[in-house]
Amino acid sequence: MNIPQQIEHNLARIREASRRLVHLSDEHIVQILNDLADRALDNSPTLLEANIRDLARMNPDDPKYDRLLLDKKRLAAIAADLRSVAALPSPLHRVLEEKIRPNGLHLQKISVPIGVIGIVYESRPNVTFDVFALTLKSGNAVVLKGSRDAHDSNTAIAALITDTLRPHGLEDVCWLAPSEREVLPHILQAARYVDAIIPRGSQGLIDFVRQNSKVPVIETGAGIVHTYFDEHADLEKGNAVIENAKARRVSVCNALDTLIIHAARLFDLPELLKNLGEKHGCQVFADERAFAILQKKYPSELLAPAREEHFGTEFLSMKMSVKTVDSLDDALEHIARHSSKHSEAIISENPAVVEKFLRSVDAAVVYANASTAFTDGGEFGFGAEIGISTQKLHARGPMALPELTSYKWLVRGEGQLR
């Protein structure tokens, strides 16, 4: 078989396997996921060896390097997430709506799996575990399309998943597609076999999937994240929130990209950025007013004047920009112009200002006096996540089990005719 035929053969196989999942009990799913958690820990040497081969092909200075990295601590967290997903209530067969019509027809709207979900992602092998757990728990089969960067890691993880599924006769409900880029268009065109595509990665990847897919796409967007330090903000609180939002993990989509500061608080800017400069070596691109304040109080080798392209940029590295505004409305205008509608935050002790910010900002997650690092399925109590949706139809924000279901109507009658 040639490549298109091989892909179609595998997609047809997974479509057939997906129909068997509707008869799988939640107790059975829990058993499989807990078994996979055990196997992930027991097979950690094999998984880490595969990951080392991937890491050896990537420049350690590449922002994607941290996303690619697996270690014992991260594998332990992955195993814990698998158990967390297993322990969650099943999202399936819930009665969402129920009514009896005047003619006696009994109507029920119930939650059901989407069917076959394709996940397209870059450089994050933990996604392979997370996605499988969430799709199985929600009764879906899954097509995994990872990148060449994580080829060896994903191959080892997929083999472990298959070995876990095989004793249950379910090895065909999860398929890792070849990592070559040439494969992706064939999956995106496979509307006969795949019910939904969810891309996770760069804006370029998301745009390519959206523009080339015949399968419905649920977008998980890039994170261009702002935090506004208001005129009425608490300095100590702002210090901690800004450092955490920027420095906790720079390569993830919820990391801070632009600090917006009220002009009346510019004198606090050196203190707000002190830890980022001294502890983390963060490069700052400051607008004219902020630059004047920082010029003699921030490491000169880490400070540069901001250009227009430094706003509306997802840095994914230890870099950030600073924008000075004269009012809350100016801050809201800047966010509206540059936001990717992912996560936005305000630091303020003025309740009226906070409420206006929360109402006005158009984003999937909007924070008051908290770090944007919390935009994560695990932190929201979902066990894990498929991604952070920045669109408004079907799903928005961290996507987990409920967002991986659809619904159908069950109508029971006694011979009624229309």
Image (cartoon, helix red, strand yellow):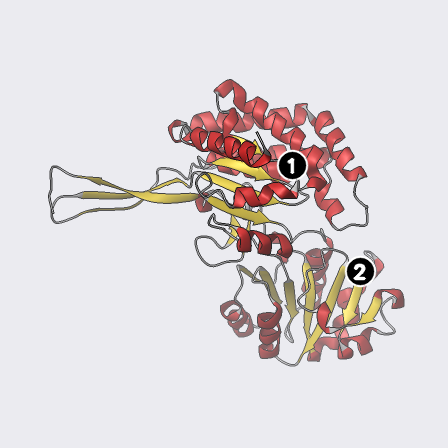
- Judged left or right of residue 412, residue 159 is right
Label 1 SS:
helix
Q: Which mark is residue 50?
A: none
Q: Can you identify the residue that label 1 sits on?
A: 77
User: Within 10 angstroms of label 2, few (less than 14), some, or many (20 or more) residues?
Assistant: many
Vertical arrangement, residue 265 with respect to residue 375, above or below: below
- Which residue occupies 16% across, 48% down? 101
- Judged left or right of residue 190, residue 285 is right
Between discs 1 and 2, the one toward the N terminus: 1
Residue 130 percent location from the top left of the image: 58, 38
Q: How many marks?
A: 2
Q: Nearer the viewer, residue 147 or 190?
A: 190
- Judged left or right of residue 316, residue 372 is left
Q: Can you identify the residue that label 2 sits on?
A: 282
Query: Is any atom of residue 397 visible in this view?
Result: yes
Label 2 SS:
loop
Q: Quadrant of residue 34?
A: top right
Kind of residue sitting beneath label 2? Cys
- Mark 1 and mark 2 in contact? Answer it, CB < 8 Å: no
Residue 358 percent location from the top left of the image: 52, 67
Residue 314 percent location from the top left of the image: 68, 60
Distance between the alpha carbons at the discs numbered 1 and 2:
27 Å
Q: Nearer the viewer, residue 192 or 205?
A: 192
Kind of residue sitting beneath label 1? Ala
Q: Which quadrant: the N terminus?
A: top right
| Farthest residue, direction front | 2
Q: Nearer the viewer, residue 175 or 7?
A: 7
Vertical arrangement, residue 139 with respect to residue 67, above or below: above
- Judged left or right of residue 141, residue 337 is right
| Farthest residue, direction top | 167
Residue 160 percent location from the top left of the image: 62, 26
